[in-house]
Image: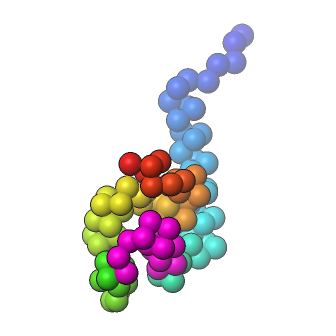
């Protein structure tokens, strides 16, 4: 009797692991506004993004559409921006593009 796992089961196991990771990060406070603002300021300093663009996003309550637009413009992963998922962190500007 062979003990093989189907591709669908492998994907399911991977999704379970990802969900557990995101829950742990959320429980640790990674998606709180202050943490997201720190990541925005970090990436702005690293890539020399105009502080006015960051202020425009962070001056009021953080909105998902603002964050999504910023992430698309600068080649960032929303998982990294929202949850701090280090596996999704762009290593450099060249890697992000």
**Residue 19: image location, x then y, percent:** 55, 54
Q: Is residue 82 above or below residue 94?
A: below
- Residue 58: quarter of image: bottom left
* Main secondary structure type of the part rendered in magenta: helix
Q: Quadrant of residue 49?
A: bottom left
Q: Position of residue 64 (x, y in %)?
A: 33, 71
Q: Give the vertical position of 1 relative to 55 (above or below).
A: above
Whether residue 8 sits left or right of residue 60 in the image: it is: right
Instruction: Judge by depth and name the residue closer to the eye, 50 or 54.
Output: 50
Relative image position of residue 51 (x, y in whole percent): 37, 81
Which residue corresponds to the image point at 37% horizontal and 55% vertical from the top-left? 75
Q: Which residues are magenta?
A: 37-51
Whether residue 36 appears in this view of the structure is no
What residue lies at 45% left-to-right and 49% top-to-bottom? 94
Q: How many marks?
A: 0
Please tell me which residue lies in front, 86 or 49: 49
Query: Which residue is farthest top?
Result: 1
Q: Is residue 69 visible?
A: yes
Q: Position of residue 17 (x, y in %)?
A: 61, 48
Examine the rendered structure and indicate whether residue 15 appears above or below residue 85.
Answer: above
Tell me: 24 left or right of 78: right
Q: Nearer the viewer, residue 43 or 30?
A: 43
Residue shown at the point (35%, 60%) measured from the top left: 74
Q: Is residue 16 magenta?
A: no
Q: How is the image coloured?
A: rainbow
Question: Does residue 46 show up magenta in the picture?
Answer: yes
Q: In the orientation shown, which residue stands out farthest toward the front?
A: 48
Is the N terminus in the top left, top right, bottom left or bottom right quadrant?
top right
**Residue drawn at the location 35% of the way across and 76% of the way down:** 50
């Amino acid at each position: 009797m062979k003990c093989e796992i189907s591709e669908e089961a492998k994907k399911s196991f991977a999704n379970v692991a990802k969900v557990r990771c995101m829950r742990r990060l959320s429980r640790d406070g990674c998606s709180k506004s202050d943490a997201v603002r720190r990541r925005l300021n970090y990436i702005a300093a690293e890539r020399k993004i105009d502080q006015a663009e960051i202020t425009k996003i962070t001056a009021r309550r953080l909105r998902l559409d603002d964050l999504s637009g910023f992430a698309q413009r600068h080649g960032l992963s929303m998982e990294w921006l929202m949850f701090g998922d280090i596996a999704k962190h762009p290593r450099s500007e060249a890697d992000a593009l």
